[in-house]
Image (cartoon, rainbow, N blue to C red):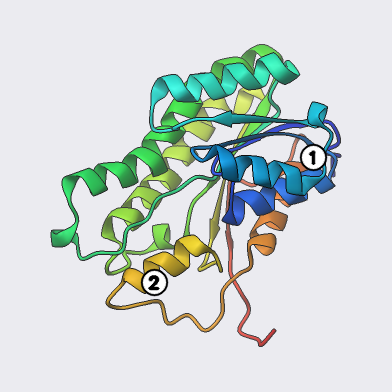
């Protein structure tokens, strides 16, 4: 497996949950990080917690649902580090409601964050990766994208679309040494999932959840695969054992 030392890794939704865990594990591998999100205070707190030298990380406050903001992330990362090796589309939105109670604004928010933002990243990264001779994009999906989950119709659909979209585009660019990978975690112990469950009339009854670190470890595995090896799609689930 390859080393991630000095690799330039961009993580969206980096301020908490899975994103912050990915930052920790990538930093431990010696990667240099670009942390993005909408809350600058939380992004700075995450960066400080990593204990990195200022030359080894960069923070970009941005709204990934806007095309110009995605462009800003990529251009800012390039100005700081000169290149991007791995881009992790981690940021996501889920709203737990019966579909007839979901507003059009909420529906658009889910699809704009979970799918359209990834499209914007492809527009920026594919030409860049072709020029620099390759690179990787890792999209964080969800087990909900494998099936229709009641109360999460829009979220499940956005993740299902992300899976198919990623697989199709991966086939378009694989001969350019560009890897596009999708990781679909089952229920994970995050505030994101807890908030959805708390607001739901039918909260998750999953006895066990993955930890954010277990998900981050799977991301690191994908990133460290040899140049010729490519995991296009993978699921990660908890075993039915007590911790």
Per the rendering, the mark at residue 226 is 1
Secondary structure of residue under mark 1: loop
Residue 84 at what x, y percent from top left?
Answer: 68, 24
The residues tagged by marks 1 and 2 sit, at their Cα atoms, a distance apart of 38 Å
Secondary structure of residue under mark 2: helix
Q: Quadrant of residue 51?
A: top right
Q: Residue most toward the bottom?
A: 242
**Image position of 45 with respect to 185: above or below:** above
Residue 47 at what x, y percent from top left?
Answer: 71, 41
Q: Residues within 10 Å of mark 2 (few under 14, many from 20)?
A: some
Q: Quadrant of the N terminus?
A: top right
Can residue 231 be seen here? yes
Residue at screen point 56% across, 74% down: 209
In the image, taking residue 47 as reference, residue 38 lies left or right, namely left
Q: Quadrant of the C terminus?
A: bottom right
Q: Quadrant of residue 7?
A: top right
Residue 95 at what x, y percent from top left?
Answer: 32, 58
Residue at screen point 28% across, 69% down: 150
Q: Residues within 10 Å of mark 1 (few under 14, many from 20)?
A: few
Nearest the viewer among 176 and 65 is 65
Which label sits in the foreground, 1 or 2? 2
Q: Quadrant of residue 101?
A: bottom left
Residue at screen point 80% across, 37% down: 31
Residue at screen point 45% across, 47% down: 163
């Amino acid at each position: 497996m390859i080393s991630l030392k000095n690799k330039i890794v961009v993580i969206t939704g980096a301020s908490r949950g899975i994103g912050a865990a990915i930052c920790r594990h990538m930093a431990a591998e010696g990667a240099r990080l670009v942390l993005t999100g909408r809350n600058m205070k939380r992004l700075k707190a995450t960066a400080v917690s990593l204990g990195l030298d200022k030359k080894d990380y960069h923070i970009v406050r941005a709204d990934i649902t806007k095309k110009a903001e995605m462009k800003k992330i990529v251009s800012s990362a390039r100005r700081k580090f000169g290149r991007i090796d791995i881009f992790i589309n981690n940021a996501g939105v889920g709203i737990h409601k019966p579909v007839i109670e979901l507003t059009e604004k909420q529906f658009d928010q889910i699809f704009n964050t979970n799918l359209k933002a990834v499209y914007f990243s492809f527009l920026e990264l594919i030409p860049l990766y072709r020029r620099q001779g390759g690179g990787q994009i890792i999209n964080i999906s969800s087990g909900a994208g494998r099936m229709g989950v009641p109360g999460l119709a829009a979220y499940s659909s956005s993740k299902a679309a992300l899976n198919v979209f990623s697989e199709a585009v991966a086939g378009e660019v694989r001969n350019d040494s560009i890897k596009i990978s999708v990781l679909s975690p089952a229920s994970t112990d995050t505030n994101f999932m807890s908030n959805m469950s708390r607001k739901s009339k039918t909260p998750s009854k999953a006895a066990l959840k993955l930890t954010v670190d277990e998900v981050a470890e799977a991301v690191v595995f994908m990133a460290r695969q040899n140049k010729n090896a490519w995991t296009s799609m993978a699921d990660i689930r908890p075993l039915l054992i007590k911790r």
